[in-house]
Amino acid sequence: MKLGEIAAKLGLKLRGDGAIEVAMPAPIEAAGPGMITFAVGAKYAGALRASKAACAIVPAELVNDAPAATLLSTNPAFDFARVLGLFFPAYRPAAGIDATAVIATDARIGESASIGAYCVIGAGVTIGRNAVLHPHVTIYPGVRIGDDFTCHSQVSIREGVAIGNRVTLLNGAVIGADGFGFVEHGGDLIKVPQVGSVTIEDDVEIGANTTVDRATMGATVIHKGVKLDNLIQIGHNCEIGDFSRMAAQSGLAGSVRLGKWCQFGGQSGSADHVRVGDRARVIAQAGVHNDLDDDALVGGAPAIDLRIFRRMVAVEPRLPEIARRLRAIEQRLGIRP
Amino acid sequence: MKLGEIAAKLGLKLRGDGAIEVAMPAPIEAAGPGMITFAVGAKYAGALRASKAACAIVPAELVNDAPAATLLSTNPAFDFARVLGLFFPAYRPAAGIDATAVIATDARIGESASIGAYCVIGAGVTIGRNAVLHPHVTIYPGVRIGDDFTCHSQVSIREGVAIGNRVTLLNGAVIGADGFGFVEHGGDLIKVPQVGSVTIEDDVEIGANTTVDRATMGATVIHKGVKLDNLIQIGHNCEIGDFSRMAAQSGLAGSVRLGKWCQFGGQSGSADHVRVGDRARVIAQAGVHNDLDDDALVGGAPAIDLRIFRRMVAVEPRLPEIARRLRAIEQRLGIRP
Amino acid sequence: MKLGEIAAKLGLKLRGDGAIEVAMPAPIEAAGPGMITFAVGAKYAGALRASKAACAIVPAELVNDAPAATLLSTNPAFDFARVLGLFFPAYRPAAGIDATAVIATDARIGESASIGAYCVIGAGVTIGRNAVLHPHVTIYPGVRIGDDFTCHSQVSIREGVAIGNRVTLLNGAVIGADGFGFVEHGGDLIKVPQVGSVTIEDDVEIGANTTVDRATMGATVIHKGVKLDNLIQIGHNCEIGDFSRMAAQSGLAGSVRLGKWCQFGGQSGSADHVRVGDRARVIAQAGVHNDLDDDALVGGAPAIDLRIFRRMVAVEPRLPEIARRLRAIEQRLGIRP
C-alpha cells in the first residue's frame, strides 16, 4: 500500500514521499525497512530516531525525531489501530445461512447475516442486520439482538437476554446462565429461581469463556462500550457503567455496581453489593470490599489507596527484622513483652 | 395470581384479603403496589413499614411491621424463592429428541426426555427419566446419569463419568477432563494417564464454564447437594462433602478433601492434599495451605483465623509509620540497627 | 496381566515371580493384594513395608523395603505412569470421519483421522496424520496442525493458528481469540485489531476452558512441551518457554515472556511485559510484577523471594501485637508519636 493512500484513508497529514510503498505495520521495536510504525510520546523519541521504518505515525512533539516519513496524528495509537485494520481486514465468513443451522420458524434474522454451521436459534429470537454467527452458537428462545452482531463459536446466550448494536462475543462466552443463589431449608439447599435477565448495551465486547449471570430478579446490566476480557465472572444483578474495562480472570460478586470508565486489573475482584465510582481503577489481584469513590486508585486485598498499598508492601518484607529490632529495644529497656 | 391462591400453594397462613391480585414478586427495595415481597429479620422492619407492596412474606417477629397483607413464614427467603417459581416457571424445552441429535445405538434414555439439537451421546450411555439436554451437549461413552438431569448447552461430559439424580450442569461446564499430572523423564515431561473418573451425587449444581477433573486413579467425588458457581476448578481426586458451596473462580488443587456444608468465597483456593473440616468457611481470595478444623473461619493467603486476619490487615497500612517510629526510638536510644 | 509381562513391556528388572497375576495399579495408600504400586524415596519405606501389594516399582534404595515382588526403576513415577497406560488405554474413538462433520472442500486431513460428529473445519485447514477430533470442535480457516493431534469437544481454534505435532487440547479450550486491546479516542473505546496469531509447538497440552489469545501483531508462542492446566489465561504476545507448566486459573497479561521449565502455581499471575528466567517457580496465588532471574522462587503479591515471603507471613499475624508493644515503649520513653 502506498503511503499517500494510507494518509488519504486516515485523513492524516503526510510529511514525506506519498509514493513510498509500505509493506506492513509493526511496533516500533520490530519495525524495519518498508514498514509503518507509531510512537506516542517523548519516551519513544530515541527508539524513533533509531528506527529504520519507512514511516511513523507521530504526535507533533515527535515529528522531528521520526525517520524518513511521518503521518501527523493527535492520537497515534488510535491511528495505528486503523492502519492495522487497513492491512489486515478481520476474517469474516461469507454472508448466508448455513444449511445445517437450526432456526426456529418464528425467529427473525436481519439482512446480510452470516449464520455458521450448526448454529441453533430458538423460538422468538430477533437478530438485526449484518450479524455474523460463527459455527456452534446456541441462542435460547426469546433473545433480542441488535445490528452488527459478531458472535464466535461455542457461545451460549440464554433465554430472554437483550443485546444492543455492534456487540461482539468471543468464543465460549456464556451470557445469562443462572446466578448463584440458594437458601438453606430443612437441612437442604434450595435453589432460588433466577428469573431475571441480562441486558447488554451497544458496543460491548465480551471475552472468551467469560460468564455473565442473569439477575435473580430484574437484569444484570452491561452498559454501552464496556469491554470484558476472558474468563471473567459477572455475578447476578451487577451493573457495569459505560466504557468500563475489566482484565482477564477478574470477577464481580452479586449486585456490584461499577461507574463509568472504571478499570479492573487481571484476577481482581469485588465483594457483593459494592458501589464503585466513575473512573475508579483497581489493580491486578486486588479485592474490593468497600465502596470506592470516583477516581479511586486501589490495590491489595482488602483494597486500599494504591500509594499506601505500595508503601506498605515495600516495608512488609522487613517485618521479621522489625520484630527483632523491637525485641532488642525491649531487652535494652528491661521490658518483658 | 390471587393472594389466596399463593397462600394455598405455599401452605402459609395469610393475614389479609385473599382476593387481592398480585402482579409479580420483587425484592423489598423495588416492591411497589400490587407486588409481593419478603423480609427475613428485624433489620428490615423499617423498609417493610415503608413498603407499598400488596403483601410481604415475613417471620412472626415482623408480622406487625408489614403492609396490608402478610404470609407468615418460618423461612421467608425459602418461601419467596417458591413464589418466584410460581410466577416464573423455568424455561423448559418440549419433550422429544431432536432429529439432529446423534445418539449411539446402545445408549439408553429414560422417558419424557428432551434432547436438543446437535447433542451427541456416546456408546453405552444411560440417562434416567425426565432429562433435559439443551443443544450442543457432548456426552462421551460410558457415562451414567440419573433422573431429572438438566444440562445446558456446550457442556462436555467425559468418558465414564457417573452422575446422580436431579443434577444441573450450566453452560460450558466440563466434567471429567484429564487431571494435570506429568512426570519429568529424560529431559521431557511425560503425561501420567488420568485413568480415574468423576462421581457426582444427587442434587448437585455446577456452574458455567466450571471444570471438574477426573481422578488419576479412583474418582473425584462431588457429594450430595454441592453447589459450584461459575469458572471453578476442581482438581483430580478432590472430594467435596455434602452441601458445600464454592463461589465463582475459586479452585481446589489435587486431592483436597472438603467436609460438609463448607463455603469457599470467590477467587479463593486450596493447595493440594489439604483436609477441610465440616462447615469451614474460607473468605474470598483466601488461600488455604493447611488443614482446617470443623467450623474454621479463615481469610488471607496463607489463610489464618478471620478475626486475626482482620486485625492484621487493619494495621498493615500503618507499617511505614511503624517502621519510622521504631527508627525514632532507636535513635533516641542510640542504637544503630 | 502377569508380572513378567509387565516387566518385559517396561524393560525393567523383576525381582520375584513373573507368573504372579496383577489385577490393577494403585497408589501406595490404596494398593491391596494383587495390585501393583510404586514408591519414589526413603520417606515411603514404611508404607512400602506395610503394603500388601503384589509388586512395587521402586528405586534401588528401597528394594529391600518392598513387598513380595519389585520392579527396579531409576524413575518409579515415570514407570508407574507407563503401567497406568498398559492397564487403561486412553479412550480413542474409531477412525473415520463422521457424516455430520462439515469440512471445507480444500481442507486437507491426514490418514487415520477420527473426526467426530458436528466438527467444523474451515477453508484451507491442514491437519496431519492420526488426528482425533472429538465432537463439536470448531476450526476456523487457515489453521495448520501437525501429526497426532488430540482435540476434545467444544474446542475453538481461531483463524490462522499454527499447531505442531502431538498436541492435546482439552474440552472448551479457546486458541487464538482476540487479545484485549482498546484505545481511547473521542470519548469512545476503539478496538485495536488483533492481527497476529498463535503458534503452539510440539508436545503441548492445554487444559479445559483455557484461553490463549492471538497476538496484536506477530504471534503468541507456546513452545515445545509446555503444559497448561484448566481455566488459564494467556494474554496476547506472550511467549512461554519449553516445558514450562502453569497450574489452573493462573494467568499471564500481555507480552510476558517465560523461560524454560518454569512453574506457575494455581491462581498465580504475571503483569504485562515481565521477563521470567528459566526454571523460575511462582507459588500459588502469587503476582509477579517484576522480571525474575533464572531459578527464582517467589511468592506473594507483589511476588518476592519465597524464603523472605514465608518469614514475612509468619510475622504478619502478630502485627497488632507489634503495634501495641511499640506504643508501650513510646509511653515508657515519653514519646508522643
Image (cartoon, coloured by chain):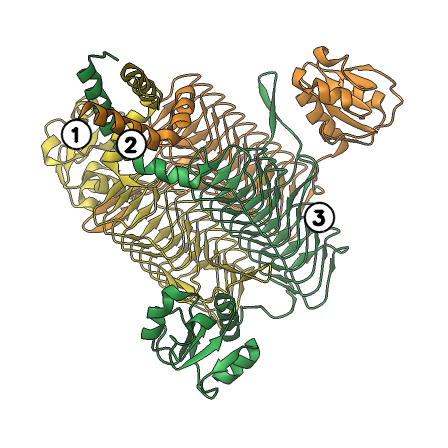
Chain colours: A yellow, B green, C orange
Q: How many marks?
A: 3
Q: Is residue A186 left or right of residue B52?
A: right
Q: Which residue is mark 2?
A: A26
Q: CA distance from mark 1 to mark 3?
A: 74 Å
The crowd level at tag 2 (other Cα within 10 Å; few <14, some 14-19, many 20+) is many
Q: Classify mark 2: helix, strand or loop.
A: loop
Residue C68, position in %: x, y? 83, 19
Query: What label sits on residue C336 in the rendered view?
Result: 1
Which of these two is toward me, C288 or A275? A275
Q: Amino acid at mark 3?
A: Pro
Q: Residue at x 80, y 22 (%)?
A: C55
Q: Is residue C39 visible?
A: yes
Query: What label sits on residue B141 in the rendered view?
Result: 3
Residue B24 position by quadrant: bottom left
The crowd level at tag 1 (other Cα within 10 Å; few <14, some 14-19, many 20+) is few
Q: Chain of mark 1?
A: C
Q: Residue at x 71, y 29 (%)?
A: C27
Q: Amino acid at mark 2?
A: Ala
- Kindly indicate whether the residue at mark 3 contacts the one at mark 2 (C-beta within 8 angstroms): no
Which of these two is toward me, B50 or C23? B50
